[in-house]
Image (cartoon, rainbow, N blue to C red):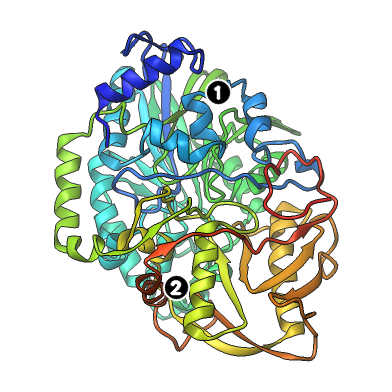
């Protein structure tokens, strides 16, 4: 990896060639990307969906993020050049690389890796030092304790320690709830900040049996909100955990808790907070997903800002949403530790007068690693290095996950399941977490675990009827493209191997998926049975080995992996949609 001086030299050369805005010259910075002019009296720092990536990584943004109905052309459903135009960013720049998929492999080699908690720590400390003491807060939007091998093997404890060192003040959650209930509570007890969630309740039956609750009268499992003073003003922060956790993830891990959007409860809570505490600003720390946050902002009044997560959208310009009580600012801060949002607020008496928002890419080559955090990370990883560093194969092409329909690493997982399980068809969940691997790089066990490290990784191979397969595709498509955001659970379309189909996202449930056929061209028949491999079952534990064992077996045999074709559907009625660019399949 190049060092900081080499990186600045490359930036300087790019600037001289007109590829970068005026930020460097002769290898030296003319303007520090991370020094922001002082503004207002409160600085709120926000990161989300880091998915336990303690070290710097590569992460490719999507080229397919389709918006339907009123979401067409609205963030986050803009990709590539359309996103750059919306944000006022120039192509061929460091920021263009951070926010888009374009020329990813070449740009990643130039600009290096992003994120890493030691580099994030340096940036957080720098941003806090730019404002007076007591005038900043660091918020974590969740999906922090899951997504890496060490997080899985330590049951999230490595990330609790990292967040304590980072100085996280307040967090909410989602994949945090995929550990066992007692593990979650233990991790929260060790977390030095506040864990908040207004929309998680303990069931009456569990309360009767003596289950722990933050408030037995209200049933809140966790503290719903907190009040902080910033710059002489009172700020309320309300937590909103992922509302569909027991549906999208195994409810059997957290049997005592119920979840939901609960926007009416949110409205009652906001009204109560404003009447009781008279805050000057109300912020919601959310893991709803951005489309859900935008709808919530339109129906819940009295909220000034929603800082969101879950959908991994790197949104350089927040959305201002009108409602009957005024306006609410909505943002989303990307994923994998790749970005830090900086929201500067000018808070007056009982209102926000003005704001400045920046979503800063965390370029590890521009930010020195914090020595204390790096020492902690090295200590966490040391017992596992032999496992993490095992070489499995070499990537001959770019491997990535993110996108509505498929990614090359997802295709690799499907190919592995079909080969090892001797199956006609493979199904793999449309998770949005998982790092990228550049052409020519080694696929280590660590990079494989980035795609698969979760608490329900078991595989299956079983017979399914064609009608069942179509219903699975229809159900997931409805989750992704339902016109009402409250019916969207996040994530992307289930990935397929050995199966082709057409998809019209704008159709209604049951009519989006057509023209299903197998890899050999045979039409998928509704009443015929097919051998299907898959993993990550939610309702009950599958009988097969963990997915990483299956894929590792395949990789060790392949030695070199090249993905030349993605099993992506023919897209219908989306031509010209600004959420699609450089699509790998047919489109009309």
Q: Quadrant of residue 476?
A: bottom right
Q: Quadrant of residue 582?
A: top right
How many marks do you count on the picture? 2
Front-most of 188 and 99?
99
- Number of residues whose C-alpha sits closer than 10 Å to that of mark 1, classed few (under 14), some (14–19) or many (20 or more): some
Front-most of 12 and 371?
12
Disc 2 secondary structure class: loop
Question: Where does label 1 land, which residue?
Answer: 350
Q: Nearer the viewer, mark 1 or mark 2?
A: 2
- Number of residues whose C-alpha sits closer than 10 Å to that of mark 2, classed few (under 14), some (14–19) or many (20 or more): some
Question: On screen, 165 above or below 567?
Answer: above
Could you give the CA–CA distance between mark 1 and mark 2, rounded to whole angstroms? 39 Å
Res 254 label: 2
The image shows residue 308 at horizontal and vertical percentages of 54, 42
Residue at 44% across, 86% down: 544
Disc 1 secondary structure class: loop
Q: Earlier in the sequence, mark 1 or mark 2?
A: 2
The image shows residue 83 at horizontal and vertical percentages of 64, 31
Question: On screen, 263 above or below 345?
Answer: below
Q: Is residue 488 left or right of residue 196?
A: right
Residue at 37% across, 76% down: 553
Question: On screen, 214 above or below 122?
Answer: below
Residue at 37% across, 74% down: 557
């Amino acid at each position: 990896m190049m060092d900081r001086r080499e990186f600045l030299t490359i930036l300087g050369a790019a600037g001289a060639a007109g590829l970068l805005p005026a930020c460097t010259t002769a290898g030296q910075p003319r303007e520090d990307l991370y020094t922001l002019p002082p503004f207002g009296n409160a600085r709120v720092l926000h990161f989300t969906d880091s998915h336990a990536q303690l070290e710097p990584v590569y992460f490719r943004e999507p080229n397919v993020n389709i918006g339907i109905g009123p979401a067409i052309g609205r963030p986050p459903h803009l990709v590539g050049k359309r996103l750059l135009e919306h944000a006022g960013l120039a192509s061929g720049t460091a920021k263009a690389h951070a926010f888009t998929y374009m020329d990813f492999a070449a740009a990643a080699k130039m600009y290096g890796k992003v994120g890493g908690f030691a580099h994030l720590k340096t940036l957080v400390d720098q941003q806090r030092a730019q404002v007076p003491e007591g005038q900043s807060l660091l918020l974590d939007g969740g999906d922090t304790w899951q997504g890496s091998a060490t997080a899985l093997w330590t049951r999230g404890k490595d990330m609790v320690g990292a967040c304590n060192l980072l100085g996280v003040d307040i967090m909410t959650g989602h994949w945090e709830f995929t550990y066992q209930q007692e593990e979650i509570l233990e991790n929260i007890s060790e977390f030095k900040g506040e864990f908040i969630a207004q929309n998680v309740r303990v069931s009456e039956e569990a309360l009767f049996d003596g289950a722990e609750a933050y408030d037995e009268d209200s049933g809140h499992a966790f503290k719903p909100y907190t009040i902080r003073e910033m710059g002489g003003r009172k700020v309320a922060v309300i937590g909103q955990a992922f509302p569909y956790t027991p549906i999208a993830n195994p409810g059997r891990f957290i049997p005592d808790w119920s979840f939901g959007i609960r926007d009416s409860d949110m409205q009652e809570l906001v009204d109560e907070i404003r009447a009781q505490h008279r805050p000057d600003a109300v912020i919601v720390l959310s893991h709803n997903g951005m489309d859900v946050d935008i709808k919530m902002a339109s129906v819940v009044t009295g909220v000034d800002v929603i800082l969101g997560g879950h959908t991994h959208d790197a949104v350089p310009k927040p959305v201002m949403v009108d409602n009957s009580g005024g306006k609410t600012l909505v943002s989303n801060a990307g994923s994998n530790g790749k970005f830090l949002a900086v929201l500067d607020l000018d808070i007056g008496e009982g209102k926000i007068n003005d704001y400045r928002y920046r979503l800063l890419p965390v370029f590890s080559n521009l930010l020195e690693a914090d020595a204390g955090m790096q020492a902690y990370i090295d200590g966490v990883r040391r017992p596992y290095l032999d496992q993490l560093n095992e070489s499995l194969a070499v990537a001959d092409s770019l491997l990535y996950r993110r996108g509505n329909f498929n990614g090359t690493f997802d295709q690799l997982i499907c190919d592995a399941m079909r080969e090892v399980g001797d199956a006609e068809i493979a199904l793999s969940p449309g998770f949005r977490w998982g790092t990228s691997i550049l052409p020519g790089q080694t696929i280590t066990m660590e990079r494989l675990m980035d795609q698969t490290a979760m608490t329900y990784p078991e595989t299956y191979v079983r017979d399914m009827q064609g009608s069942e397969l179509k219903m699975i595709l229809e159900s997931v498509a409805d989750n992704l493209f339902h016109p009402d955001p409250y019916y969207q659970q996040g994530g992307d379309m289930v990935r397929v191997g050995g199966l082709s189909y057409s998809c019209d996202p704008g159709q209604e449930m049951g009519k989006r998926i057509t023209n299903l056929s197998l890899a050999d061209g045979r039409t998928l028949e509704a009443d015929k049975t097919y051998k299907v491999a898959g993993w990550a079952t939610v309702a009950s534990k599958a009988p097969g080995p963990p997915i990483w064992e299956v894929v590792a077996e395949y990789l060790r045999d392949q030695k070199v992996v090249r993905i030349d074709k993605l099993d992506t559907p023919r897209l219908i009625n989306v031509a010209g949609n600004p959420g699609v660019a450089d699509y790998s399949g047919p489109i009309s």
